[in-house]
Image: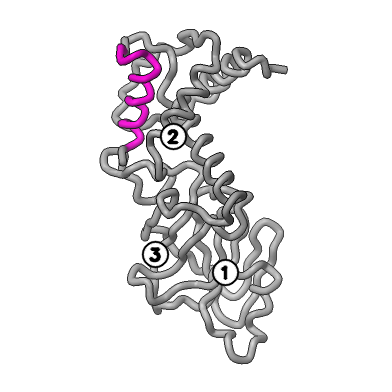
């Protein structure tokens, strides 16, 4: 598998007939946004067809900081209370519409201490369970995770195996070495090329002279302009 930069270069090579010039009109951030769109579509398609998701789409990171909230807290209108301390971890934005497949594992680094997932109503009633009230549980509210009963005393960071909408938002992402999480790189490249080639003409809307050592933050004006051109080429612009 390849890094984001390597995949973008392959897409550019194919798109230009292996003749990339300095005035290549499509910025890297647009290509990267297409990569994420295609990846998310493939994940949803696989889930809808099989109710399973290939492990290669997931990212495992063990650097999500655990924050103690005390015995009561509120997240996005949901009130959590418990007899013991509650904790919170903020994850990258997760892919939605795939049930509980967005998080495959939540626990310690070794793997012998993990949390079980509950919906909000179940989570707030665990303190009344006779035999399982002290198990480790979590509930998801947006991209925030509320936890109770840490499996390892004094845990500071949590390991999470997740499906992030934007893979580079993972806490341990390294643009030089981390591989883009997708099982078939060739299929990804083919589908991104199809999206690029669906435009009748892509003009140079940005003099992209920035250092591309890492994937830059998306310039929303540029991104919107190029996506609008893609829509016009498809005949889908309203």
Residue bearing mark 3: 157
Q: Looking at the image, is mark 1 or mark 2 nearer the viewer?
A: 2
Q: Looking at the image, is mark 2 or mark 3 nearer the viewer?
A: 2
Q: Which residue is more in the foreground, 59 or 184?
A: 184
The vertical placement of 197 against 157, above or below, is above
Q: Residue at x 37, y 41 (%)?
A: 180
14 in the magenta segment = yes
- Give the CA distance from mark 3 to mark 1: 18 Å
Rate crowding at label 1 as few (under 14), some (14 to 19) or many (20 or more) other CA atoms within 10 Å.
many
- Quadrant (top left/top right/bottom left/bottom right) for the N terminus: top left
Q: Residue furthest front?
A: 49
The disc, 2 or 3, on the residue closer to the chain's N-terminal end is 3
- Give the CA distance from mark 2 to mark 3: 33 Å
Q: How is the image coloured?
A: one colour
The vertical placement of 3 against 223, above or below, is below
The disc, 3 or 1, on the residue closer to the chain's N-terminal end is 1
Residue bearing mark 1: 117
Location of residue 164 in the rendering, given as x and y in whole percent from the top left corner: 49, 48
Residue bearing mark 2: 188
Q: Which residue is more in the foreground, 128 or 163?
A: 163
Q: Residue furthest bottom?
A: 130
Q: Which residue is more in the foreground, 96 or 225?
A: 96
Location of residue 80 in the rendering, given as x and y in whole percent from the top left corner: 65, 70
Q: Residue at x 51, y 59 (%)?
A: 103
Q: In which quarter of the view is residue 220 placed?
A: top right
Q: Looking at the image, is mark 3 or mark 1 nearer the viewer?
A: 1
Q: Residue at x 50, y 23 (%)?
A: 194
Q: Which residues are magenta?
A: 3-19
Magenta span main SS = helix
């Amino acid at each position: 598998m390849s890094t984001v930069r390597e995949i973008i270069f392959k897409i550019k090579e194919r798109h230009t007939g292996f003749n990339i010039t300095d005035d290549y009109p499509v910025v890297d951030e647009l290509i990267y946004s297409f990569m994420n769109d295609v990846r998310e579509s493939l994940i949803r398609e696989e889930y809808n067809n099989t109710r399973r998701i290939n492990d290669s789409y997931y990212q495992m990171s063990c650097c999500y900081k655990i924050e103690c909230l005390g015995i009561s807290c509120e997240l996005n209108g949901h009130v959590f209370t418990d007899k013991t301390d509650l904790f919170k971890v903020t994850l990258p934005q997760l892919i939605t519409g795939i049930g509980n497949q967005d998080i495959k594992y939540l626990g310690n680094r070794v793997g012998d201490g993990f949390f079980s997932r509950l919906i909000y109503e179940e989570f707030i009633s665990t303190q009344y369970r006779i035999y399982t009230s002290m198990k480790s549980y979590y509930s998801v509210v947006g991209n925030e995770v509320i936890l109770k009963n840490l499996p390892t005393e004094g845990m500071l960071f949590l390991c999470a195996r997740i499906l992030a909408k934007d893979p580079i938002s993972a806490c341990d992402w390294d643009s030089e070495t981390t591989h883009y999480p997708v099982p078939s790189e060739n299929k990804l490249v083919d589908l991104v090329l199809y999206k690029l080639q669906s435009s009748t003409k892509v003009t140079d809307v940005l003099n992209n002279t920035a250092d591309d050592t890492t994937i830059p933050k998306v310039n929303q004006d540029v991104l919107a302009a190029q996506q609008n051109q893609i829509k016009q080429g498809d005949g889908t612009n309203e």
